[in-house]
């Protein structure tokens, strides 16, 4: 698989820096729009981070509140990922770099997930990035998404451990990037960083999986 020509090899370094700055700021703040926190804190007036695992993610929200508001959380976290990747593509289109949009996509993916995990307006305490990350994988390459989502869904369905499926998805992301997207070293560095970041966010889950104390997926909601 051939390497992607870098904008730094075309004499447009200033434009590349400006485009990446727009992507970094825009995608990060989009990522900060954490669906579980927004719905629980501002609509239900009961911050999800004070319940269950304390994580501001879909699984903890589903276990704690359940109900139709879960769909709103999904819509927010999927929507922000879609807009972030779109922003990455448009920034590189605006800079007139046809064929280089993959840099914008992966840069947007990185900053969107950093915003989701470490939102500045919510005390840098966010989610673990699986739903938004899975949406990003779908927008990057359908084969990558098939690998990531397929493994996640199969493992979760067989074991009822969402964390096990998440760990697989995180590990599969850089592998799928190498197999289906590109061998470009910059893209591979971003993909590897994201995979390791998601694994690090699941470090407590991994420990519980190894000790047999991890919670299985359930659909009980908090009693009123």
Image (cartoon, rainbow, N blue to C red):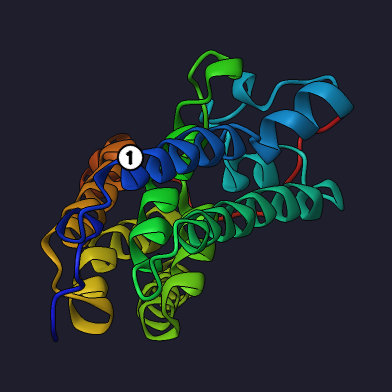
State the quadrant of the N terminus.
bottom left
Please indicate, yes or no, whether residue 205 appears anywhere in the rendered image. no
Along the viewing direction, whichever of 92 and 144 lies nearer the viewer:
92
Callout 1: few (<14), some (14-19), or many (20+) C-alpha neighbours within 10 Å?
Answer: few
Left or right: 148, with 87 as reference point: left
Q: Quadrant of residue 200?
A: top left
Where in the figure is residue 68, as x and y percent of width and height? Answer: 87, 53
Q: Quadrant of residue 56?
A: top right
Along the viewing direction, whichever of 208 and 84 lies nearer the viewer:
84
Q: Which residue is mark 1?
A: 17
Left or right: 210, with 146 as reference point: left
Q: In the figure, 28 relative to 195: above or below?
A: above
Q: In the figure, 166 relative to 110: above or below?
A: below
State the quadrant of the C terminus.
top right
Q: What residue sits 40% from the left and 57% below the top?
A: 104
Where in the figure is residue 31, as x and y percent of width and height? Answer: 56, 39
Q: What residue sits 42% from the left and 70% below the top?
A: 152
Q: What residue sits 80% from the left and 49% below the top?
A: 72
Where in the figure is residue 161, as x and y percent of width and height? Answer: 43, 58
Please indicate, yes or no, whether residue 89 appears anywhere in the rendered image. yes
Q: In the figure, 113 relative to 174: above or below?
A: above
Left or right: 21, with 176 as reference point: right
- Please tell me whether mark 1 sits on a helix, a strand or a loop: helix
């Amino acid at each position: 698989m051939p390497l992607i020509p870098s904008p730094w090899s075309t004499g447009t370094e200033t434009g590349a820096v400006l485009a990446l700055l727009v992507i970094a700021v825009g995608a990060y703040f989009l990522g900060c729009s954490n669906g579980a926190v927004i719905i629980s804190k501002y609509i239900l007036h009961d911050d999800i981070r004070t319940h269950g695992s304390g994580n501001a993610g879909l699984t903890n929200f589903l276990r704690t509140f359940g109900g139709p508001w879960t769909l709103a959380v999904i819509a927010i976290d999927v929507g922000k990922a879609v807009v972030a990747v779109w922003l990455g593509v448009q920034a590189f289109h605006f800079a007139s770099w046809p064929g280089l949009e993959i840099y914008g996509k992966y840069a947007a993916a990185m900053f969107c997930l950093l915003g989701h995990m470490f939102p500045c307006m919510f005390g840098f305490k966010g989610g673990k990035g699986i739903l938004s990350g899975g949406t990003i994988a779908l927008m990057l390459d359908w084969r990558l998404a098939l690998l990531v989502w397929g493994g996640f869904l199969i493992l979760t369905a067989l074991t009822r451990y969402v964390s096990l499926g998440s760990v697989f998805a995180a590990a599969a992301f850089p592998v799928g990037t190498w197999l289906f997207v590109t061998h470009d070293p910059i893209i591979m560095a971003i993909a590897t960083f994201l995979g390791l970041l998601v694994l690090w966010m699941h470090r407590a889950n991994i420990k519980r999986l190894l000790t047999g104390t991890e919670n299985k997926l359930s659909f009980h909601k908090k009693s009123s």
